[in-house]
Structure formats: C-alpha cells, structure tokens
Amino acid sequence: VERRISSSKGDSSPRVLGAQNDEQNCTHGKRRGCVVLALVFSAVIFEFLNFPPFHNISIRPPKVYQWLSKQEGDFAYLEYPTRIYYTDWLYQYVHGKRVLNPYHRTTPEVKKLVKEIDSSEFVSRFESLGGRYILFHRPEEKSEKQRAAESWGFPAWGTHAELPEAEETKNELYFRDDPRFREVYEAEGIIVFGIKKLRN
C-alpha cells in the first residue's frame, strides 16, 4: 500500500504530465491575454491624454482668427464660401466676434445676403448686419470621403450640402477685382477682405 501511495505521488505518467502542462499553458495564456488587454487600454487612455506643453491634437487657432481677435469693436464677419457645418464657430472663443452664416439659426436677411452678393445693395446690407470682413477660404483638396460621395453623384461640399449656385462662380479673383472689396490680411489659405469705402 505504501508503495502504491508513494508511486502515485511521484507519478510521471504522460497523463499526469499532460495535465500539468495544460495548467501551465492556461496560466501562460491568461498572462498573455492580460498583457494584450493592458496594451489596448493603455493605447486608448493615452491617445487623448495631453501632457503640457505637448498635445496630440493641435489646439492652435489659425492665424487669421488670432488677427481677428485684435481688431477693435463689436462686428460680424462672413466665412466664404458659406459652410453648413459648425466649423465657423469653432474658434469664436478666440476672437469673440459674431459670425454670419445662412445655414444656422439666423435672420432671413443673412440668407438673402449671400444669394445677392452681386447686388449693388450688398455692402449696405452687409454693414447693416454688423458685417466688416469677409473671410475667403481658398479651395481645399477634397477628402477621400468627398471624392467617394461625388463619384456616386452626390454633392460633397461641407457635409454633403450642395453649394449654392450664387457661390459657384465666386472665386478669389472675384473679390480681388471687385472695387467694393479690399484685401486686408492673408494667412494659411484664408484671405480677409474688408469693405472699401467708395467715393460718391
């Protein structure tokens, strides 16, 4: 009996060794899984974790909005071409000026303003709304998403909102050549046009 007990304690049969190996592999697999999960969670946590003065996402406002913040007075400005999404308000915390955008909650006069930019009354209407500057954005290279949308026959300006017909022909030269406007600032693909005071 003693021999059987002692032999069972020191049993080195393949069945016993296999069970021990399975237990070790299981433990090793759990450790490996924990390491993988830890790496994944670390990547998620540290992706948006900022350590001043370094930032994963640039928070520096474009130069034109910094310039706008230094202009005195309470006035409004128009981003052109107009955009349906809320990018126009993104840097309002920098300059504190009002934005004229026909797509968002605004007066009907702003919607008319953009459609009738060729009108001789545009300047007076613009100024009556507190407008002082027009921020003209040079065309940006279309994203892959926009190109894909256009390939399916959908307009892809902004958030796939169709660009108004009145704005399709208004390019940089339109504002430069028009005697009503004058360039006052330019930086990073954005040109600021002011209203030129014409002599009667």
Image (spheres, helix red, strand yellow):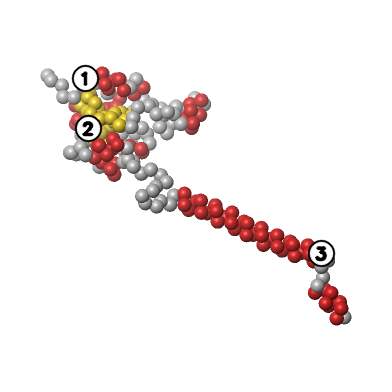
Helix, strand or loop under label 3: helix
Tell me if residue 148 can be seen: yes
Q: Is residue 4 left or right of residue 151?
A: right
Q: For the residue marked with disc 1, what is the amino acid?
A: Pro
Q: Residues within 10 Å of mark 3 (few under 14, many from 20)?
A: few
Label placed on residue 15 = 3
x, y percent for residue 11: 82, 70
Q: Which callout, 3 or 2, points at the residue further toward the start of the chain?
A: 3
Q: Amino acid at mark 3?
A: Arg
- 69 to the left or right of 22: left
Q: Earlier in the sequence, mark 3 or mark 1?
A: 3
Q: Between 64 and 161, which is closer to the camera in this rendering?
A: 64
Say which amino acid is labelled 2. Gly
Instruction: Give the spatial CA distance, label 2 vs label 1.
Output: 17 Å
From the image, tell me which residue sits under label 1.
179
Q: Which residue is mark 2?
A: 131
Label 3 or label 1, whichever lies nearer to me, is 3
Q: Is residue 111 visible?
A: no
Q: Residue furthest left?
A: 200
